[in-house]
Image (spheres, grey):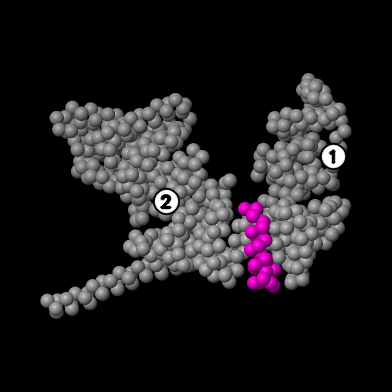
C-alpha cells in the first residue's frame, strides 16, 4: 500500500505541474498577443485561463486591458473589478480601472481608484495627476488645488503641476493667479508650448491680438502639429488686418487636419472677403458635406452662389435656412432680391411682405455686417453668418490623463444591424472553430430523416454550382416519391430543405405546409415535429427579407406575423429550443418591438448563458430603447464571447452623452 501511495504522489505532482505549465503557457501567449496589439486573440487566450482558474487575478487584469484597448470600457471595468476582488493590493488594477471610469465620465469613482493608489504608493505621480484631473472634471476645485499643492511640495520642478493649478485658477475666474502659475512654468521651462498656448488664450480673450500673435507663434514653434494653434493665430491676424498671414495659417491648419471644420469655415469667410468666391464656395461645400444642416454655412454659400450667378442654387440654400429659422428677416430680404433677378416677382413680394409684417425697421433696418466679430461653433444663429468661428481656448481643452497603457484601438465602424437568424443548413461559411454552436436533440432526430447532415447556424453558405445540380436532382426524385404517396411527411420535409437551399422559399413553405398537415394526421407524431415549424419559420423569414425590398409595409408585417406564429408553435412543443427564442427576438427587433424582443433574447440566454448573438441583439434592443448602459453591457458580453464587431458599437455609444 505504501509503495502504491509513493507511486501515486509523483504522478499527481506531475499532472499538477503539467496543468500549471499549460495555464502559464496560455497566459504567456495571451500577453504576447496583447503586446503585438492582437487584442481579439488575447481575449480568447485569457478566456481559457479564466475558465481553468477563475480564482486568478492576472487574467482578468489582462483581459480588461485588451477590452480597454478595444474601448469596451464597461467590460474592462468589470474585469478589473474582478481582479481587484482577487488581489486588492495591485496599484495597476486600480489605475487601469480609473482610466476606464474616466472614459465613461464617472469621475467620482475614478477619483476613488486613484486615491487608493496614492494611499498605497504616495510616490505614484501619475495617480496624483489623474486624481487632480478627476477633481477638476467634478468642479471640485478646492480638492484639486489641495492635491496640486501636495504634488508641488513633492515634485516642485514638475511643470504639469503648475499648468494644472493655472487651469484650476482659470476655472475659478482668477486670471491673476492663473498667470502667476504660468509664470512659474516659464521659469522652469521657457519653451513650454502649452503654457504659451494658455497665455495666448488670455490675450485673445482680452482682444490683445498683437500679443496673442506673438505668443501663438512661440507655441507653434514647440507644437507645430496642432491645427488649432494656426486657426487661433489666423484669428488674431485677421484682427490685425494681416489677411495674407491669416490665409497662410488656415492653409497650414488644413494641411495638418484636412477635415477641420473651423479651418474650412473661416477660410471660406476670408476668401469671400477678398473676392475669391469660387474658392470660398469650395470651402463651404466641404463644411456642408460634413454637416448638411449647417444653416450658417448654407447662408454663406447662398450669398456666394448669388454673386457667381447660380441663382437656383442660392435660392435652394436660402430656402433651407428659412425653413429652420423662419424669423431670419435678412434671409427673406436676400431671397426676395434673388427672386427678382430670376423674374419671380410674386415670390419676391411675398418675402418682402413677410419682412414688413415682422417690422423690418426693428429687426433688420440697422443691420451691418461685423467682419471682425466671432462666434463659437455651437452658436448657430444665422444672423452671425459672417463671423469667424473661434477655436476653444486652451483653458477649455480636454484633459490629458497619464497612462502607461499603450495600444491601438478598434476603429472599424458598425451600425445597428442585428445578428442574423439561425437556420437549418447543409452548408456553413468558413471555419466553425470558435463560432457559437447550439445543440438540441431535436436536430439529431431530424437528421435521421435527412439525406445530409443539417446544422443550426447563422452563417449559412450558398450552394455551389456543383451542388446545385444535386439539389435539383433530389427535388425530382422526391417529387416522384410524393406522387407515389411514399412517406409523405418525410418526403415533403426533405424536398422543402432542397427548395430552401435553391432559394425557392415559396415552394419550401408549401411543402412544409403539406409536411405539417400529414404529420398532424399521423397517429404517432414525428419526434422532430417542432423542427418542421422552425423550418417553415426560417423560409417565411427568408421570404420576408426578399419582400422588404420595395414591398408595402403591410405585406411585410403579415409575413412577420407568419414567422412569429410558427416560432411560437415550435416553442409550444419545445420550450427549450433556444434558436426559436432567438429568432423570435430577431423578428420583434426588426418590427421595432424592442421591449418584447429583449424579453425573447433574455429567454434564450436563460437557456444558454453563453449565446453571444443573443447578447448582441438584446444590446441593440436596449440601445434603441435608450437604455445605453444595459446595451453596452450586453455588447461587452457579446464581444467577450467572440462577436468582436460589438466593440465598434461600444466605442460609438460610449462617446455619446
Residue at position x 45%, y 40% in the image = 621
Query: What is the C-alpha distance between the residues marked 1 and 2?
Result: 56 Å
Contact check, label 1 and label 2, Cβ < 8 Å: no
As for residue 155 lying within the magenta part, the answer is: yes
Using a 10 Å C-alpha cutoff, classify the residue at mark 1 as few (fewer than 14 neighbours), some (14 to 19) or many (20 or more). Answer: few
Q: Which mark is residue 21?
A: none
Residue at position x 67%, y 66% in the image = 149
Highlighted magenta segment, given as a residue range: 138-161
Front residue of this view, candidates 302 and 88: 88
The image shows residue 166 at horizontal and vertical percentages of: 72, 61
Front residue of this view, candidates 537 and 355: 355
Q: Is residue 193 above or below residue 610?
A: below
The image shows residue 43 at horizontal and vertical percentages of: 42, 60
Using a 10 Å C-alpha cutoff, classify the residue at mark 2 as few (fewer than 14 neighbours), some (14 to 19) or many (20 or more). Answer: many
As for residue 327 lying within the magenta part, the answer is: no
Q: Earlier in the sequence, mark 1 or mark 2?
A: 1
Q: Is residue 643 among the parts visible in the rendering?
A: no
The image shows residue 641 at horizontal and vertical percentages of: 39, 53
Q: Would residue 141 appear left or right of 69 to someone viewing this image?
A: right
Q: Secondary structure at mark 2?
A: helix
Front residue of this view, candidates 477 and 328: 328
Residue identified by numbered label 1:
369
Q: Would residue 432 appear left or right of 617 to someone viewing this image?
A: left
Within the image, what quadrant is residue 310 found in?
A: top right
Q: Is residue 300 above or below residue 2?
A: above
* Residue mark closest to the camera, 1 vs 2: 2
Q: Secondary structure at mark 1?
A: loop
Task: Name the magenta segment's main secondary structure.
Answer: helix
Q: Quadrant of the N terminus?
A: bottom left
The image shows residue 562 at horizontal and vertical percentages of: 35, 29
Residue identified by numbered label 2:
637
Residue at position x 30%, y 69% in the image = 19
Amino acid at each position: 500500500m505504501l509503495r502504491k501511495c509513493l507511486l501515486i504522489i509523483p504522478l499527481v505532482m506531475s499532472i499538477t505541474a503539467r496543468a500549471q505549465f499549460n495555464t502559464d503557457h496560455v497566459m504567456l501567449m495571451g500577453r504576447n498577443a496583447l503586446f503585438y496589439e492582437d487584442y481579439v486573440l488575447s481575449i480568447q487566450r485569457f478566456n481559457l485561463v479564466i475558465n481553468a482558474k477563475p480564482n486568478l487575478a492576472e487574467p482578468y487584469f489582462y483581459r480588461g486591458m485588451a477590452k480597454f484597448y478595444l474601448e469596451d470600457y464597461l467590460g474592462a471595468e468589470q474585469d478589473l473589478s474582478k481582479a481587484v476582488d482577487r488581489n486588492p493590493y495591485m496599484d495597476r488594477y486600480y489605475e487601469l480601472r480609473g482610466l476606464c471610469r474616466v472614459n465613461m465620465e464617472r469621475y467620482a469613482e475614478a477619483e476613488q481608484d486613484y486615491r487608493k493608489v496614492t494611499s498605497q504608493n504616495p510616490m505614484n505621480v501619475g495617480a496624483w495627476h489623474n486624481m487632480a484631473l478627476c477633481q477638476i472634471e467634478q468642479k471640485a476645485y478646492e480638492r484639486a488645488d489641495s492635491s496640486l499643492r501636495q504634488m508641488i511640495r513633492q515634485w516642485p520642478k514638475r511643470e504639469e503641476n503648475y499648468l494644472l493649478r493655472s487651469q484650476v485658477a482659470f476655472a475659478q475666474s482668477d486670471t491673476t493667479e492663473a498667470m502667476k502659475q504660468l509664470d512659474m512654468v516659464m521659469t522652469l521651462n521657457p519653451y513650454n508650448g502649452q503654457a504659451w498656448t494658455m497665455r495666448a488664450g488670455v490675450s485673445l480673450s482680452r482682444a490683445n491680438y498683437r500679443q496673442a500673435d506673438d505668443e501663438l507663434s512661440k507655441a507653434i514653434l514647440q507644437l507645430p502639429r496642432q491645427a488649432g494653434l494656426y486657426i487661433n493665430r489666423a484669428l488674431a491676424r485677421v484682427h490685425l488686418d494681416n489677411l495674407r498671414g491669416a490665409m497662410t495659417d488656415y492653409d497650414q491648419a488644413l494641411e495638418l487636419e484636412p477635415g477641420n471644420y473651423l479651418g474650412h469655415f473661416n477660410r471660406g469667410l476670408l476668401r469671400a472677403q477678398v473676392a475669391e468666391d469660387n474658392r470660398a464656395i469650395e470651402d463651404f461645400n466641404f463644411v456642408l458635406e460634413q454637416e448638411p444642416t449647417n444653416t450658417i454655412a448654407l447662408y454663406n454659400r447662398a450669398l456666394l452662389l448669388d454673386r457667381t450667378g447660380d441663382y437656383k442654387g442660392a435660392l435652394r440654400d436660402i430656402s433651407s435656412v428659412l425653413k429652420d429659422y423662419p424669423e431670419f428677416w435678412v434671409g427673406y430680404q436676400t431671397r426676395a432680391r434673388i427672386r427678382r433677378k430670376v423674374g419671380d416677382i410674386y415670390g419676391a413680394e411675398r418675402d418682402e411682405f413677410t419682412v414688413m409684417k415682422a417690422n423690418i425697421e426693428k429687426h433688420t433696418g440697422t443691420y451691418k455686417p461685423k467682419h471682425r466679430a466671432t462666434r463659437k461653433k455651437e452658436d448657430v444663429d444665422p444672423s452671425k453668418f459672417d463671423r469667424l468661428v473661434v477655436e476653444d481656448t486652451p483653458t477649455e481643452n480636454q484633459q490629458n490623463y497619464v497612462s502607461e497603457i499603450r495600444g491601438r484601438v478598434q476603429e472599424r465602424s458598425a451600425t445597428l444591424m442585428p445578428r442574423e437568424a439561425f437556420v437549418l443548413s447543409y452548408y456553413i461559411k468558413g471555419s466553425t472553430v470558435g463560432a457559437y454552436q447550439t445543440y438540441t436533440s431535436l436536430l439529431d432526430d431530424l437528421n435521421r430523416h435527412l439525406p445530409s447532415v443539417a446544422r443550426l447556424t447563422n452563417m449559412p453558405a450558398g450552394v455551389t454550382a456543383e451542388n446545385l445540380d444535386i439539389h435539383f436532382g433530389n427535388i425530382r426524385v422526391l417529387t416522384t416519391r410524393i406522387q407515389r404517396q411514399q412517406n409523405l411527411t418525410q418526403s415533403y420535409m426533405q424536398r422543402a430543405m432542397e427548395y430552401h437551399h435553391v432559394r425557392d422559399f415559396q415552394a419550401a413553405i408549401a411543402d412544409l405546409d403539406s409536411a405539417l398537415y400529414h404529420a398532424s394526421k399521423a397517429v404517432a407524431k414525428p419526434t422532430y415535429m417542432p423542427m418542421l415549424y422552425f423550418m417553415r419559420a426560417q423560409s417565411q423569414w427568408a421570404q420576408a427579407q426578399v419582400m422588404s425590398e420595395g414591398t408595402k409595409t403591410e405585406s411585410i408585417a403579415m409575413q412577420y406575423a407568419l414567422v412569429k406564429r410558427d416560432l411560437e408553435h415550435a416553442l409550444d412543443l419545445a420550450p427549450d429550443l433556444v434558436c426559436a427564442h432567438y429568432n423570435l427576438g430577431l423578428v420583434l427587433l426588426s418590427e421595432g418591438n424592442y421591449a418584447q424582443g429583449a424579453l425573447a433574447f433574455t429567454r434564450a440566454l436563460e437557456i444558454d448563458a453563453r449565446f453571444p448573438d443573443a447578447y448582441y441583439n438584446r444590446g441593440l434592443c436596449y440601445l434603441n430603447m435608450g437604455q445605453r448602459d444595459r446595451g453596452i453591457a450586453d455588447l461587452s458580453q457579446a464581444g467577450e464571447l467572440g462577436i468582436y464587431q460589438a466593440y465598434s458599437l461600444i466605442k460609438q455609444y460610449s462617446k455619446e452623452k
